[in-house]
Amino acid sequence: MSQGLCTSCGYVGETKTIPKGSTDTEVILWFCFLIPGLIYSIWRFRSRHEICLICDQATIIPADSPKAQQIIRENRAKQVVAAIPDFRPPSKAAIGAGRVVGRFVGRLLK
C-alpha cells in the first residue's frame, strides 16, 4: 500500500490495490471456455490499480507529487476558514425545551 491523494473526494492516505475486471466474468469464462478464461485470469492478475479507501474511485495520484501538494495546500486553507463557525447562543425556546426534557429524564431515572 502507498500514500496517495484521491482527486474525487480529497482523501489523503493509504490506498487499496485491486485487479481490473470482474470476478463473475472470470468464472463464466473458465466454465465456458478454458483458453479465454486463462487469458482473462492472467490479464486480471497482471493489471492491478489503486483505488481510494473512502469512495472506491481510481482517481489516485501520488501524495508527494507537485499537483497533490498544491491540492492539499488549497484544501487546508479552506478547512481553516470553515473550522471557525459563527457562535450563536441558544434561543429561549431551546433553553426551555432543554429544561423540560431534563426534568422528564430526571423523573424517569428516579
Image (cartoon, rainbow, N blue to C red):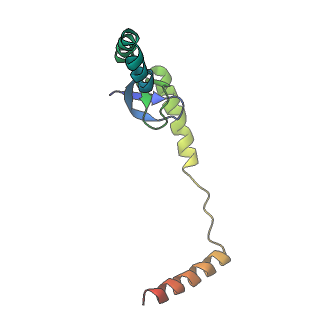
Percent of width and height locating residue 6: 48, 30
Picture quarter with the N terminus: top left
91 relative position to 44: left or right: right
Picture quarter with the C terminus: bottom left
Q: Residue furthest front?
A: 32
Q: Residue furthest left?
A: 1
59 relative position to 46: left or right: right
Residue situated in front as seen by the camera: 73 or 62: 62
Which quadrant would residue 36 be assigned to in this image?
top left
Percent of width and height locating residue 23: 41, 25
Q: Is residue 93 above or below residue 38?
A: below
Residue situated in front as seen by the camera: 69 or 11: 11
Residue situated in front as seen by the camera: 64 or 44: 44
Percent of width and height locating residue 41: 36, 16
Q: Is residue 38 visible?
A: yes
Percent of width and height locating residue 108: 47, 87
What residue appears at the point 58 percent right and 84 percent down from the top-left corner? 100
Which quadrant would residue 26 be assigned to in this image?
top left
What residue appears at the point 56 percent right and 52 percent down from the top-left corner? 84
Q: How many marks?
A: 0
What residue appears at the point 48 percent right and 89 percent down from the top-left corner? 107
What residue appears at the point 37 percent right and 18 percent down from the top-left corner? 30
Q: Is residue 48 visible?
A: no
95 relative position to 106: left or right: right
Residue situated in front as seen by the camera: 65 or 51: 51
